Image (spheres, rainbow, N blue to C red):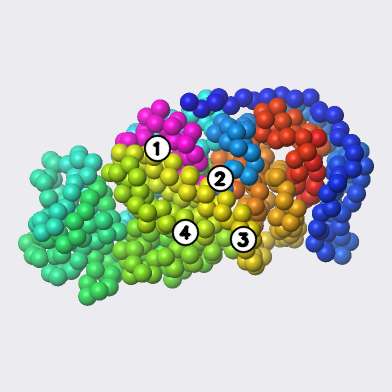
């Protein structure tokens, strides 16, 4: 059972005194201003042609705006993170985030809490399955869990998309296709459940477009069929690769060794049903909407404009699912337009040769980091754990590689939605992530990756340079944590992109920003009712974290603020 989070109120803590014994290694374009006390303030040099707001230095070296106020403030602490920090310390925290698809196996309140305690950062609802009432219950259950237990689990809604899909399986949660069995795929409409091995297809032109000898890949290759006969609206197929068939699974047509793309290319990315689902997601206040089968950046821009108009400026993030050849042709433009990306390897693997999937995954993960967009590696990470309590060694190696590539998040699909061992599957992701991350730090594998400039204004450029310098300093000094105070989460995301060795504590006054930050690598988001008084924010933060046993006196931290565009190095008093 999770420890219930507490909202605590603190008076201003005593100012620390005594000089720091640390000598930071400061990049050449930054100067170190030593003041009385533990704090050091780093400011841009005069050659930067900019300056910080008028401020008054305090005894510990923190600059405070002259007009700063000192309201009482509170901090919301995530229960799972609090327990992890208190028990194992800074360096033990998991950097890679975990996304769990919620389904019949995990939709109950107790099951959702078990996933949150086990490390779930984002709960995904898949609009391919279930009705909107069911999804509404799940979304509200996650919100109650956050409110009552102190978690910050975000909610992601995944659209169905307008690609060719199978229908339901007569109410069954799955069906097993065996080698040599004859199945019928039909476009016939029926008000009653279809017999076994007869599957409805949502695309009316399906029977016309397929040819005898074509191959049908179900759900990215989980089962495979060969077309042997066409009879009006019915297409008879023989199972050539046995596997598990799920309701509303995607169908991909292959002919002469390559995917048939003509019809799919003509279908809209967002269907009429998707627009209704999107309206539902906006009304329920989901944190992310993942768009299936994105082909171009235009659809992402169109959806973001629609969300802004319908929600009155809501900050719902739009994620692009990369799962088609068309998306790969426009990859950089799609990533730039989106708020994040999902590498949907299952359907992607049905459209490109299997041996290309690993290199495509690596390319997408690297490009997303360069462009400062969170990236989720999804599909079939622990597929065997749908039925078995332990994963294959190959699956563990696959998870390890995604963590080693420094992906922001890993996602469970069927493993948590309808598998027999959802909590064990999540535990495997968590333990493997922790072990590979620890190995990375022990080997001191600091990447020489040159991050490209992503700032769109001079002010953003200052924030970017501050974050790049802070990450280098954190690694060189071996600091325990980086604290960042952020209004909209942008500076926190820039720090996450740098992938420093230490955890990043992100403090924001916005509950929705806090949840959205829970998708990004290395960020531990807190909600802080802060002020423009940086000294007051730091003192309250230290008081809370020390009271909860999450930091100790003498811990070395770097503190940043997007309000003052400042950076400080200090010991916890």
Q: Residues within 10 Å of mark 2 (few under 14, many from 20)?
A: many
Q: CA distance from mark 3 to mark 4?
A: 15 Å
Residue that mark 1 sits on: 423
Percent from the top left, x then y, of residue 508?
Answer: 66, 39
Residue at point 73%, 34% (across, down): 552
Residue that mark 3 sits on: 445
Q: Residues within 10 Å of mark 4 (few under 14, many from 20)?
A: some
Magenta stretch bounds: 96-123
> Which tag, 4 or 2, sits closer to the chain's start?
2
Badge 4 vs badge 2, beta-carbon distance below 8 Å: no
Res 460 quadrant in image: bottom right
Residue at point 18%, 49% (across, down): 176
Q: Secondary structure at mark 2?
A: loop
Q: From the viewer's side, name the closer residue of 165 and 101.
A: 101
Badge 1 vs badge 3, beta-carbon distance below 8 Å: no
The disc label shown at residue 381, or none: none
Percent from the top left, x then y, of residue 567?
Answer: 79, 50
């Amino acid at each position: 059972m999770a420890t219930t989070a507490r909202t605590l109120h603190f008076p201003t803590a005593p100012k620390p005194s005594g000089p720091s014994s640390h000598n930071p290694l400061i990049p050449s374009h930054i100067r170190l201003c030593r003041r009385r006390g533990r704090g050091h303030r780093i400011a841009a040099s005069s050659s930067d042609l900019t300056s910080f707001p008028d401020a008054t230095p305090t005894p510990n070296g923190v600059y405070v705006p002259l007009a700063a106020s000192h309201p009482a403030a509170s901090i919301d602490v995530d229960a799972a993170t609090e327990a992890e920090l208190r028990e194992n310390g800074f360096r033990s925290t998991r950097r890679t985030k975990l996304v769990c698809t919620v389904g019949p196996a995990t939709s109950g309140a107790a099951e959702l809490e078990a996933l949150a305690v086990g490390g779930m950062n984002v709960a995904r609802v898949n609009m391919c399955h279930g009705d909107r009432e069911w999804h509404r219950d799940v979304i509200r259950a996650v919100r109650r869990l956050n409110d009552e237990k102190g978690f910050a689990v975000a909610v992601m809604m995944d659209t169905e998309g307008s690609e060719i899909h199978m229908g339901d399986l007569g109410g069954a949660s799955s069906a097993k296709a065996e080698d040599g069995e004859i199945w019928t795929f039909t476009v016939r409409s029926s008000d009653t459940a279809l017999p076994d091995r007869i599957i409805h297809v949502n695309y009316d032109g399906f029977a016309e477009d397929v040819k005898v000898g074509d191959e049908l890949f179900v759900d990215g290759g989980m089962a495979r069929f060969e077309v042997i006969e066409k009879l009006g609206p019915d297409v008879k197929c023989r199972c050539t690769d046995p596997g598990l068939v799920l309701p509303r699974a995607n169908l991909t047509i292959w002919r002469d060794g390559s995917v048939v793309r003509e019809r799919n290319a003509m279908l809209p990315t967002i269907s009429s049903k998707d627009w209704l689902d999107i309206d539902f997601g906006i009304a329920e206040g989901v944190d992310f909407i993942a768009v299936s089968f994105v082909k171009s950046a235009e659809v992402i821009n169109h959806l973001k404009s629609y969300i802004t108009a319908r929600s009155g400026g809501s900050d719902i993030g739009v994620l692009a699912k990369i799962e088609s050849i068309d998306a790969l042709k426009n990859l950089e433009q799609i990533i730039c337009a989106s708020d994040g990306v999902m590498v949907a390897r299952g359907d992607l693997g049905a459209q490109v040769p299997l041996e290309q999937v690993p290199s495509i995954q690596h390319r997408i993960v690297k490009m997303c980091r360069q462009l400062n967009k969170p990236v989720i590696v999804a599909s079939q990470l622990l597929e065997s754990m749908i039925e078995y309590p332990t994963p294959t060694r190959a699956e563990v190696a696959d998870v390890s590689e995604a963590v080693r590539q420094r992906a922001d998040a890993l996602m469970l699909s069927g493993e948590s939605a309808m598998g027999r061992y959802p909590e064990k599957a999540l535990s495997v992701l968590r333990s493997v992530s922790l072990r590979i991350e620890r190995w990375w730090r022990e080997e001191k594998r600091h990447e020489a990756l040159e991050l490209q400039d992503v700032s769109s204004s001079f002010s953003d450029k200052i924030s970017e340079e501050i974050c790049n310098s802070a990450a280098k300093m954190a690694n060189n000094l071996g600091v325990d944590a980086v604290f960042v105070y952020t209004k909209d989460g942008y500076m926190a995301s820039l720090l996450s992109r740098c992938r420093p060795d230490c955890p990043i504590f992100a403090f924001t006054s916005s509950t929705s920003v806090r949840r959205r930050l829970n998708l990004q690598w290395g960020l531990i988001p807190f909600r802080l009712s802060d002020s423009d008084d940086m000294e007051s924010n730091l003192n309250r933060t230290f008081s809370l974290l020390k009271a909860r046993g999450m930091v100790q006196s003498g811990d070395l931290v770097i503190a940043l603020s997007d309000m003052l565009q400042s950076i400080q190095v200090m010991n916890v008093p």
